[in-house]
Amino acid sequence: MPATYHIDAPARLVVITWSPGIPQLTDWTATITAVMSDPAFEPGFSILSDWREAAAPPDRLLMETLVDSIHALVVEGVYRWATVTPRTKASVGAGRMAELMAGVNELPIRVFQEYADAHAWLCDDRATKNQPRKH
């Protein structure tokens, strides 16, 4: 399930759009590596990960791996992480599980079914606080 990404430097936002398919850790890792090594990426950017075309949500093991990986990215300077999922019961459940796992570690991760809601959460305070979050 390959992905494309776009970096909006003025908004301090990266949008990752996943192709239709089943989420795979290798694709996720390759995409995140590309984003983090892109010269336009800077600490303090937020990431919107658009999984609306996913055929199925990640299984529990993959979800735990993704949340752990996002934790490492937050330590490296990602400000917030939002994921947009399909509106299926399984995807909503997986998203809730991710939020619960993130909450245990106090990570700035949220899962949405609406792209506009995810975008607003990532950017709502950036207009007045255009500073990277300190850890």
Image (tube, rainbow, N blue to C red):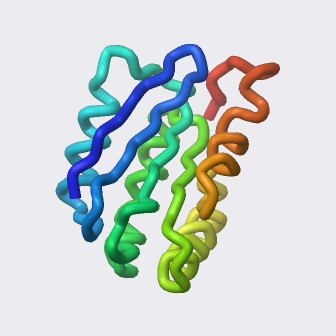
Residue 78 in the image: state x and y as whole percent: 52, 36
Residue 73 location (% of width, % of height): 44, 42
For the point 72% across and 26% down, which residue is it? 126
Q: Name the residue nearer the viewer: 5 or 107.
A: 5
Give the residue at x 32% y 32%. 35
Residue farthest along the right direction in this orientation: 128
Q: Going by the picture, which residue comes out furthest to the bottom?
A: 89
In percent of width and height, residue 64 lies at 41, 70
Name the image quarter holding residue 40: top left
Q: Is residue 111 left or right of residue 52?
A: right
Towards the viewer: 28 or 76: 28
The N terminus, quarter of image: bottom left
Give the answer, above or below, for where 60 lies relative to 71: below
**Residue 7: % across, % down:** 43, 25
Picture layout, residue 58 above or below residue 135? below
x 45%, y 37%: residue? 15
